[in-house]
Structures are given as C-alpha cells and as structure tokens.
Amino acid sequence: MAAEKKTTRELNQRFRTALVGPPASRPRYAAPGSGNESALEVESRYPSMLRTPSIETVSDLFIRATQWCGKDEMFVDDDHRISGFDVLDQALRLAQGFSRLGVAPGDVIPFLCRSSARHAVTWLAAPLSGRIACNLHVRETSRRLGEVLGWLDAKVLVYDPELETEALAAIAVLGRPIQLISLGERGHANTHYSDMITTCSPFDVAAARPKPDDVAAIVLSSGSTGSPKGVMHTQKTLLEGSKSGQTALALITPKSSILLYINPSFAAWTLILLPFIAASAKACFGKTFAAPDFLKACQRERITFAPSVPTVWRMLFDAGPEKYDLSSLTLAAVSGEAPSETDVRQMYSRICKTIRCFYASGESFIGTCFSVTPEELAEGGKIGSSGRPLIGNDIKIVAPGGEFDDELPVGESGEILLSSPATAVGYWKDSEMTRKKFIDGWWRSGDLGRLDADGHLYVLGRLDNVINTGGMKVHSEEIEHALLTHPAVAQCAVVGQIDVQLGQRIEAYMVARGERPEAEELSQFLRRHHHLAGYKVPKVFHWIDALPLGLTGKVSRIALRTSKPVDSNVWP
C-alpha cells in the first residue's frame, strides 16, 4: 500500500512537471487579468488538485469547494470577477503574506472593509491558514475602532483604500504601530493585495492544517453597555454552519448565486456566505446599498437568492421591483427582525414565490427556518413565525432569568435557548459572560419568544433593552449613560419606537436640569463628546416632567413606548 501511495504521488508530480515545468523554471504567478499570465498557466494552475485527508474543518471545506468551483466565477463585484481556482490560489498567497508580516496562526486579523470580492478572498485566507478573521464595524467611530484593535491584540489591519483615513485614525487611538494591508492602492499601507498575490508563494496549508477546535472567526456584536462582544467560532462550528445553511437556504448548487449588500461585520454576512462557498456557488458583492443598484445587480448577474432584513425589503418595494427582470430568483429570505404579514405578502407577489424566514444570530448562526407557502398565505396561520429548528438543532423556552432547565409549557413566552452543532464556543476574553450564556451545548439568546403547538417559533423581542434600528442593534444604556453626562439632563431613558422604515426608531426621554437645550445641541454632544456613531443618535428627543416608574421602582419602558409627550425635538 505504501508503495502504491508513493507511486501515485510520483505520478502526480510528474503530471504537474510535464504541464508547468520543474519548480525553478515556472514563471512567476501573475494576477488574473494582468496580461502577464500565459494560457498554459491559466489552464494548469492546479493540474493535480490539493487534497485534504478528511473534512474536519472549514479550512478543509474551503480547499475542496474552491477547487470544485474551478474556472467558474466564485466571487464577483463591480471591479473583480474571481474564479474558484483563483480564490484558493490568491487566498493561499495572502496567507503566506500574513506570515511574512509576522501574523502567526492563532492571531486575529481584523478587517475594516465593506463587502467586496477581494475582502471575501482575504477573509477566507485567515481561517484557511489557522488565523482568526474578525470584521469590524465600518460605521463605528475611530476611537472605538482603536479600542477594539487593542482588545483583539491586533498585529495587522486589512482595510479598503477608501477607508484609509478611518484606519489611520484608529491606529492613532491604538497608540502603537501595526502592519497595514490595503485591498486597493498601497497608500500608507505596508503592503497591498496585488503585491501580496504576485510576490508571495502559496502557504503550505498541508504542513499546518488547522484543528477542529481552533478559533477561526470572531463575530462582533455589542455587550450590555455597548462595548464589543466577540462571538468565537471554531473551525468546526463554521463547518457545521456551512452545512446547516444548505438546509435553510434550500438546495444550493454550483449554478446558484447570491447577492450580498451586507456589511461584513453583520453576522448574516458570514452565516449566509459560507453555505454558498460550500456549494461552490457564486457570491456577488456590493459595497453601498441603494435599492435600484440592488435590483439592477439581481437582473445583471441572474441572482438566484436574495437575503435581507425587513427594512431593506421595504426600500426595494418602494423602488418598483416590477421594472426589473427578477425571473432568476428562486428564493428570497428575511431575517434580522420579524417581518410583518404585509412584508411577506409583498415579497411573494412582487419579488419571488419562494420565501423563507429565519431566526439567526452570531452565536447560533441559522437556528430555525420557516418556508412561506401559498397555503400559508391563504390561511395566514404561521405568517410571523420563524419556523422550526433545522436538522440537528434544538430549541426550548425557559423562564426569563431562570435556570437552563426551567422549561416553560407550549404557548408561554420566555427566553429562547438554542442548541446547535454550529453554536459558538464563547465570547472573546469574557469567561464570565461565556459561563452565563453557554452551558452544556445550549446558548441563552436573550430573546423573548414562544413555541406553538406545532413547534413553530415566534420571536417577540428582546429581554434586555436592545433597539433594532434598520438592522443595527443598539443598547439603550450606552446612549443613556452618554446623555446623563450633559449638564442639562437630570434623568433619561432611551427606547425604540415602531418605525415603518427602520423597524425601530431611537427616541430619548429626558428630565431637564434647568434650561432645555435644542435637539441639534444634544445630537452634536453625543457625536463629539462620546463619539457615538450616527445610527446610535436618537431621532427624537422628548422633555418630560418625570420618568414613569414600574412596581419595582424601575423605569417603565413600556409606559414610555405608549406615551405621547408634549415637548419633543426632532433631529433628522
């Protein structure tokens, strides 16, 4: 048997040498489209496929899926169209470039990038080679970004060239130099994408295979005070998420295609992209969302799957989807917040006849799925549901604040707990929070929900005070703490009010200390003194005589959501 294996290896090497010559005589790799690579080089870059002995990690999955995509397009945007072969080749060269910059396996590689083909390849290069990928919030302030870089122990930062000013400002806050990689022109970076894929040899992943329990990605969300919370996924949980997504997203084939105008820092970017990579399918990216551009891209690229949040679907309805050829769409999906029945019916009549609603998070990836059928539309019985657990997943409802085994009867509302092969392993540098949220394979979501008699999950909102505005989750306490530092604010509470476009609109209720400042002054105070991103600044400021209190003496947020204050200042 050993002799047979040796002969096979020798034949593979002879096959490779016959096509491209011995290693010393091979031409330097040239980036596709550069005009410097020969037809033979394109034909035979992988005359003998890179094999993995098993499929235990997401790294193994990437290696297999990209090669079986082959010469077909895998990652596409307005500037680049990259085949499966080239995705793997460039990712391996980028991984070797990370080594050259002193980034070792197990180190975190942060990305300050919008959605693009080059970002996807570079992100993939991290877990492929045992590093940890982490997408940063591009709309966050430079101060917060600098703090996050320090928290991640970052040695390098990958960024879009148009975000170079923000990247340099974040480095200044960090207070120490780190290596900079630009995805476009070099600018102030130490190196850039094109240079790395043309000067670096491929990383020897076979000699340094990641292990299933190695951390592969950190998905950022927000903690109870708005500080970052890093959801850790291993090579194995990303692999499991890739597989379960095949069930949730219907049958994905190599002929399938997805359109992602999703900020990579959103968990949805990872949990939706991975199943398409696994299927050797095509992913198309857009950096900045505009409804007409999204619809044009669907038509141009013959997109088969379009996912988004209810807020974005409402924008697409307003843009007139009937003006575009969307006949290639085989599935439209909604997640992030519960869609209204009107949303679902409009998606069915104006976008696509196959609709799925998901319950998903950075911690659990896609936990449940509900398929909207013509029968459901006619009867309306389950519209608003997030469906039943996917294969291998489990859900239970427990008493809010209770123990993990305080399970409630069917129909009662409580906290949603989820168990899944794709569930994260904990939070970055937060063992206490990990112990509270993860136990014996279960994760406490902090979401309020109920199960009906048929096992369908209905998500009712948050147990805490998270406001979901336009798909962005904001903690009210972060804004409240900032407002209370203003000399004119004696007391305050921040809540989310129902908004047709945003889902929830952030509004602040304040008790004055002396003269009442105008809304513009308060808005600028939050931005300049507390560096709050624009989406976190309240849209409306209300002055009231006293905050309503509940039976326990705490502020009653329910009362605020139903109140109609007289003195209000609106800040656009």
Image (cartoon, rainbow, N blue to C red):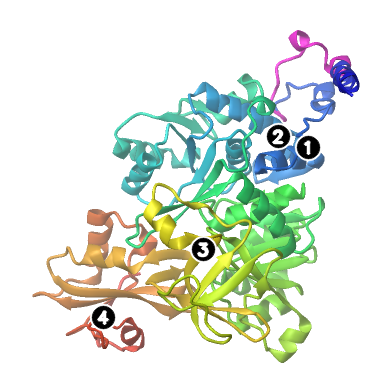
For mark 4, give the secondary structure.
loop
512 falls in the magenta region: no
Q: Using the image, tell me which numbered label, if any, was put on residue 443.
A: 3
Task: Please state, as top left, top right, bottom left or bottom right, where the N terminus lies in the image.
Answer: top right
Q: Magenta part of the protein: which range? A: 16-33
Q: CA distance from mark 2 to mark 1?
A: 7 Å
> Of callouts 2 and 3, which one flags the residue occurring earlier in the amino acid sequence?
2
Q: Residues within 10 Å of mark 2 (few under 14, many from 20)?
A: many
> Of callouts 3 and 1, which one flags the residue occurring earlier in the amino acid sequence?
1
Q: Which residue is mark 1?
A: 67
Q: Residue at x 84, y 18 (%)?
A: 13
Badges 2 and 1: C-beta atoms under 8 Å apart? yes
> Of callouts 4 and 3, which one flags the residue occurring earlier in the amino acid sequence?
3
Percent coordinates x, y for residue 511 in the rendering? 17, 78
Percent coordinates x, y for residue 92 in the rendering? 65, 29
Q: Which residue is mark 2?
A: 88
Whether residue 336 appears in this view of the structure is no
Percent coordinates x, y for residue 392 in the rendering? 69, 63
Q: Residue at x 34, y 71 (%)?
A: 539
Q: Which residue is mark 4?
A: 555
Q: Residues within 10 Å of mark 1 (few under 14, many from 20)?
A: many
Q: Residue at x 51, y 28 (%)?
A: 104
Task: Please state, as top left, top right, bottom left or bottom right, where the C terminus lies in the image.
Answer: bottom left
Say if 382 sits above or below 23 in the image: below
Mark in front: 2 vs 4: 4
Tell me where residue 494 sits by quadrant. bottom left
For mark 1, give the secondary structure.
helix
Mark in front: 4 vs 3: 3
Badges 3 and 1: C-beta atoms under 8 Å apart? no
Name the residue type under label 1: Gln
Left or right side of 380 for 142: left
> Of callouts 2 and 4, which one flags the residue occurring earlier in the amino acid sequence?
2
